[in-house]
Image (cartoon, rainbow, N blue to C red):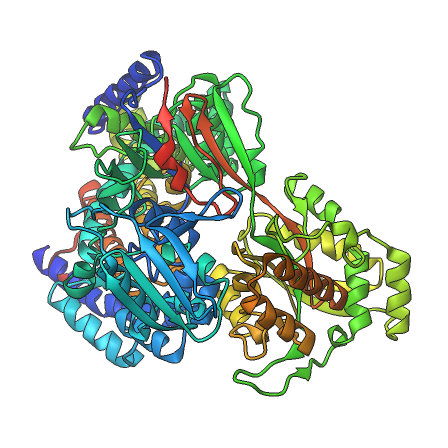
Amino acid sequence: MMQMSRVVALAAAVLLMVGMVQSGPVSAQDSNTLIMARAVDATGLDPHTQTAFASIRLTELIYEPLVNTNENLEVVPALAESWEFSDDGLALTFTLREGVTFHDGSDFTSADVVASLERILDEETGSATRSNLLSITSIDAPDDLTVVLGLSLPDVPLVTALASANAAILSADVIESGDPSVDAIGTGPFVLDSWTPEEQTLLSANENWWGDGPNVDGIEIRIIPDESTIMAALRAGEIDFALLNDPLIATLPTDGTDVVINRAPDIAYHVLQLRAMDIPADPGTPSAVDNPLSVLEVRQAMSCAIDRQAVIDSAALGEGQVTGPLTIPSFAMPTDQLFCYEQDVDRARELMEAAGYADGFELTVIVAAAEPPTALREAETIQAQLQEINISIEIEPLELSVYVDRWLAGDFDAAIALNGGRADPYTMYARYWEIGAQFGNVAGYIDDTLDELMKSGQTETDPAARAEIFNQFETHLTETSPWIWLYTRFLYTGQQSYVEGFVPNPTGSLVSLSQVSINR
Amino acid sequence: MLRYLIQRLLMAIPTLIGVTVLVFTAIRLVPGDSITAMLGTEAGLLTQTQRAALESYFGLDKGPVQQYFSWIGNVFRGDLGYSVRLGEPVGDLILRRFPVTLQLALMSVMIAIVVGVPLGISSAIYRDSAIDLTGRLFALIGLAAPNFLVATVLIYVLSVYFGILPNAGNFTRFTDDPVRNLSQMIFPALTLGLAFSASIMRTTRSAMLEVLGMDYIRTARSKGLREKIVISRHAFRNALIPVVTLTGIEFSYLLGGTVIIEQIFALPGLGRLTLNAIAQRDYALIQGVTLFIACNVVIINLLVDIGYAIIDPRISYADGS
């Protein structure tokens, strides 16, 4: 029949396949190149405009900022060796590292720092990081290795805000005459050889990197969109290292294999956002929303009625830690000191009665489908818990982009969210809780106490006094319950046991891949 | 015949333009845009000027009508547009991804035919026998098992029990290393082929049963023709029409990319390209890919019609009939 030749071809194919199966594991990775897999690829290469975590995980290997944050969220030197505020706090001086070169061989100098920071501040660039650097009034380079930032106020969190790939230093030449979305020329430990979007990225070690390392010849990043396939690839020994996002996948048993799963607490937080007020853009007068969430006791009742640990247990298999607003270990208060962190349904009912809502009300909660993977299950657990105080929740699942649009517009009553953390509490929350903040209407709540605490937290230079300010901030936030903070998740990486030296970072940073070695 | 072909192709142009208008409008009616897709919630930190700068970068600063006409104008010049996000012309992206999808579609259809047609014929000939029952059970399972489940089970078995995973994100093109490529493609093709072979089996079986009940089959038998000849020349050929129709439909569906299978088996095909383009609101890419897929459907429908004429001489497209 006419299919005969096809039959033969197919049979040959099957035989070949069987042959491969029998020849045992295909270990293509006997080289010293780290093979890494992840589900989502970068959306672009320009470090100043690509804010998605998936993009930063790539750009932070190629580019470096002036400073970085280590695994304890302390600021550590990167391209700057040291930094110092002037006595009045209105000037910040960076002393740059000597002998650093860009991947194209040119020298790194203060001119590159000036050009990069000016590029971020230039509105034409479209860099969202600009909003963290607004206190900068002047950028001067007295010599090749010194940069002085003039500030409009003693902006203590500025140093931490600069510790991000989004504030990376690009070569002044590329900014002048190239295209940073194509010419990925940084100073970082790895050099970009090729980027085939949604397939593969090839990085090679930067031989001239100033630091100690890299210890591998390069990194091959593969995109495997399905995390259970990533896990299968780890088990099969096809990949050395992987980023995992879904706790249901990361907690699958790996016994009988050499696969090791690393867990690090994340500073991003899962939260039930409520909106108590409509807050117009540009200093306008906030007005209470036309629903029971505008009543303090109702929000407090909801906070008391929710068993946060149960949310973690049922939505994330127990993979997480109950958290207050501050997720940075050096600032976070013990949760037993926060308002109603122990579930107390009786107290919740009393509060509902005091507010005149003993019979409850209906509330719609928006949820992004699969972002984070646990979102829908969190909403369902909270739905069951709030039913106890007669609040009946309707869950509205939305596609991610639609969710983001509604979220940014403040077009919701309540939302399940996973909001990003920062290494400094001011940078983390100023966007929500200052009068006139960009996300004021998303936060849906403001009062003078929050505004004052934020502002003094920004300019207080004494660390002890600063910690005290943020304690008050955290106490006040949980008492007024504009949002109900739930938990922080873990960041997971999977790896073969022969991969040594990776240090997980609470920001998810992969910078320590420069220290990794392969010891088969 | 040639006149018919030209006529059909010309008739396809309004259809294709209709498709472009529909997709262009639909994707812009969906909330969210390229900027929020790229920045997520950070988009809310942008000033008006910053937003305007990014809109012009993504080519969103012109009105939708103007955007459409400049795009369709370029299409007629052979330029499908440029994906700002991926920094590559849409045409190049499609040309890199399409061979993967085409190969997967060809392999699964081949598997489906090789398995489904003989099963269907034997089921029909030995109706209600053990062969028939087994064939029908196979068809039932093939149709009922969702392919994401089959795919996941396959991957689990391969990695846990055999310690292998032919494609761990290191997909190799056929032209680079055919052996490696086939070892990576065979499992996804089997997954897709299984379900399709089930429907081919059922269609073949019922078409054969219908034909076998016809008078001319009885005539052929009573002439003393050998059963083998009766089946292959007289019955099977006439039963082929619905099978060809089904194959055509399935093939054009597969050429649109099989999102789930490409996701699970990490194949860089057209389906994943489209899915990510939609998630990232990459308008130029979505439009280009949809137009390309629509062209495929038109061409395959045409091929199916030509196939009818080859199988059944009574069907003729001469004189524009």
Residue found at x 52% / y 56%: A422
- Measuring from the top left, give residue B36's x and y in whole percent: 42, 66
Q: In the picture, which quadrant includes the N terminus of chain A?
A: top left
The single residue placed furthest to the front in the displayed view is: A87
* Placement of A222 over or under A384, stated as above or below: above
How many marks do you count on the picture? 0
* Placement of A28 over or under A94, stated as above or below: above
- Measuring from the top left, give residue A206's x and y in whole percent: 23, 38
Seen in the image, is B74 located left or right of residue B143? left
The single residue placed furthest to the bottom in the displayed view is: A284
Q: Quadrant of residue B283?
A: bottom left
Q: In the picture, which quadrant includes the C terminus of chain A?
A: top left
- Measuring from the top left, give residue A429's x and y in whole percent: 57, 65
Seen in the image, is B287 located left or right of residue A519? left
In this view, the residue in front, B278 or A139, is A139
In this view, the residue in front, B130 or A216, is A216
- Measuring from the top left, give residue A365's x and y in whole percent: 66, 64
Residue found at x 68% / y 57%: A485
Residue found at x 50% / y 62%: A157
* Placement of A351 over or under B131, stated as above or below: below
Residue found at x 32% / y 16%: A18
